[in-house]
Amino acid sequence: MRFLRDDRGQAIQIGAVLIFGLIVVFLALYQGFVVPNQNEEIEFNHNQQLQSELTDMRSAIISMPGETTTRSVSVGLGLRYPSRAVFVNPGPVSGTLRTSGTTDEAVNLTIENATASGEIGDFWNDTAAYNTGAIEYRPGYNIFASAPRTAYEHSVLYNDFGENTTLPITDQSIVDGNRITLVTLNGTFSQSRIGDTALDFEPVSTETRRVEIFNQSSPITLKLPTRMNESEWEAVFDEEMNASGGNVKNISETALPGVEDFSLLEVTLKPGTYSLRMAKVGFGTNVEQTREAYLTDIEGDGAEIQTGETQTLTLEVRDEFNKPIGGVTVNGSAENGNFTGPDSKTVTKQTDSEGQVTVEYEARNTGNNAINFTIEAGYQPSPDGSHAAGTKENVTMTVQVNDPPESVGGGNGTSAFDVEWLDPDPNDNFETECDNKSCTLNYTEAQQLDLTLNTTAQNAPVDFAVSNSSVGTLNRSNGTTDSNGEVPVTFQPQANGTVDVYGWTGGGGDSIEITVKNYQQGNQQLGLAGKAVFVKKGGSGKVQLANSSTTTELGGNADIIGPFTTGLDSDNLGKIPYINGDNDEIRLINEGGNDELLMDGVGLPTQKSLLAVGDWDGNPTSVYFADSNRESIYRQDKGRATDNPELVLDDSNGDGVRAVLGVADITGDGDEELVFENDNDKLSYLKSENGSPTEITITGRDIGENNAPGIGRPADFNNDGEARIPVVDGNNNLVLVASDGTATEIVSGDVTKAPIAPVDWDDDGDLEIVYLDGNDLKYVDNPLGSAQVSTISTNTASDSAGVT
């Protein structure tokens, strides 16, 4: 038998081996050819998606002018291949996005041969250069070797295939008819990753003004650093070219000296006027903010007024991209006139949030008067000196001042009948002598001035006017003379300064010059009457009213007192509010000692508190006080029922209320706040009755308190527009506290922890601070200056009520 030599199964084995080999060959071919092709398609599709996302990025950048918030775009820089069960993919792809040239001072966008009219032309004069650059994406594909780099520059997104071959993806938005829009990039960004990344574009200078520019002797030329070739730029500018009816005269490209990666594109425009808008967009880190670059006039230049009238002058500070800049100091000087308000030849103000500053110029002499302004640091232009008008930091505005068309020179008998003002103060009630030509009104003595115009005609129509309504107004603009040929008018002060009051008829006219001093509006007027209030030591609560020459005992039975005020009712009598703890009521005692009830409808504190007086948040002048539970603030005015005070603040769930200090603009924003001490011995203030208290933490200090808290009414001690709060700290130092908690020490030690008061004690028109040293009354003059301390009286005042 032949069993050992049987080979009938070999064909099956060989077939299996051959089939396996074919599978291996197929897999190898698939891995070697199909998988790469599929992956290349994936990479290509990713590149197309990426270009779409970069187009969104480009749209975000060119739409930044006018934006105020950061704009974000998401871009997928790399990719991961889909999973395969058998076959093998290469590793995931990462791409790189980076800035180029955006911090290189040699890579500049330049505007040449451009100028502008007026003060703007001091900055826009010939050539302006701005750093900018490009954003570039570089792929790191494994298969798609011919993938381009994609770049953004000057509003255009394009593909760069190397060897000076570029292809734009989008159009340009630099030139559109006679409108030029230039958006620069600044900052450093470089990121390589596989997944998505967020690109944040910061509005560094985007709220910009459009300015009108025009060419000088040569055409306006835009010079832009670029990596895109000249022919492609010609393609994207095609609709704006001169041959197509546009304003682009020529496109050319040259080497950019000192920079290898960039060329210099020159876009030459046809002669004419163009509307230019610029913006600066920050991207990544190392973004540089802009600052003030030039000053320009907005309103009032070239105006024509008459002597004694005022003209509003408005200026604006801008950065190099023409964005208004707030918080910049502008100094000004006036020729042949004054700035109203401070009544000064010079003025210093800061630009507001819109980058503007507004002043009122009052003309004194006829002519084409110059008013000079500057933002140059450390320079104050002289009213009569030279001024470098024509430099970008300086502005000269002119106002043509003429004589009134009709003389109002006085009753000298040369008119059809005599017209003249009578002496407004025949009884010498004012501290400065008045006559029928001039008068000084001390606002602390009288809040209005009664005038009489005298004529020799009966039943004659008379007109009245003032030269500067910001200093004072009249209660009537016309009238008719009586049987004596007279007609009255009342002058009402509005600010410190000098104003002419005119009265005239068809037969003639006259003027009188009125100077207002010591004017303070509303709550700041408290204390300028030069009167301090205290309770006599050991005097059973007797209220004392003192000035620099006399002390008067008014009476009453006071536990807690408020300041002397004339604003609680229309009789103009000075009154002092106080709390009578025995009867749980607030009373008013006037200068003559007459006492009346103001409020008895709420439980009141009997110690360690303070009363405030002020007009706040649209309410009439009121007394503000804390309740006995130290939880709430109430107010009471003369028009309310005595048992019905108005609730101002319920802080029962907060820090409570210990004492109300007063009303003043402590934040310097032009709005007054209601200031109080909470029950945690912290200063607080309210912006409005619907607001929440804002607590002030005094830096390194606390409020001292023994029998009463060491606090006082807030006031503006240096006329800078920002009130400060007088406080006695825990170490018996007198300090002035600003709204940010900064404390300025005025008197070191020996100040009793009791209420203190801002008072014009020496009658110089400025506030001093009256305080207690033990039971002695003292005051500090010029508290934010030399801070000189003097004694008023000894052993006279109760330290449980202090001084108000």
Image (cartoon, helix red, strand yellow):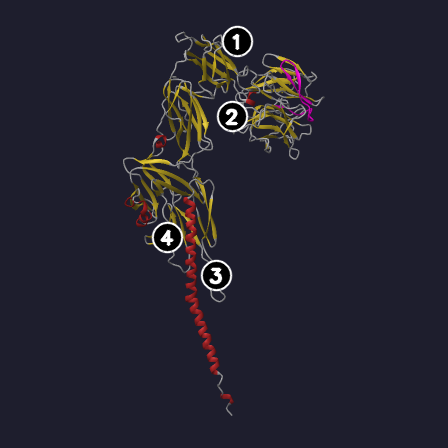
Say which residue label 1 marks.
428
The three-letter amino acid code for the residue at tag 4 is Asn
Q: Earlier in the sequence, mark 3 or mark 4?
A: 3
Q: Is residue 337 visible?
A: yes
- Where does the image place residue 138, in percent across and percent down from the top left? 40, 53
Element at badge 2? loop
Separation of residues labelled 3 and 1 (CA atoms): 101 Å
Q: Quadrant of residue 147?
A: bottom left
Instruction: Mark 2: give few (<14), some (14-19) or many (20+) Cα within 10 Å.
Output: some
Say which residue label 3 marks.
82
Separation of residues labelled 1 and 4 (CA atoms): 89 Å
Taking 10 as reference, is 743 left or right? right
**Looking at this rendering, what residue extends furthest in the bottom direction?**
1
Q: Which label belongs to residue 592?
A: none
- Where does the image place residue 382, in percent across and percent down from the top left? 39, 22
Taking 104 as reference, is 750 left or right? right
Q: Earlier in the sequence, mark 3 or mark 1?
A: 3
The three-letter amino acid code for the residue at tag 2 is Gly
**Looking at this rendering, what residue extends furthest in the right direction?**
582
The three-letter amino acid code for the residue at tag 3 is Pro
Q: Is residue 725 visible?
A: no
- Where does the image place residue 769, in percent across and percent down from the top left? 58, 20
Separation of residues labelled 2 and 3 (CA atoms): 68 Å
Separation of residues labelled 1 and 2 (CA atoms): 34 Å
Q: Earlier in the sequence, mark 1 or mark 2?
A: 1
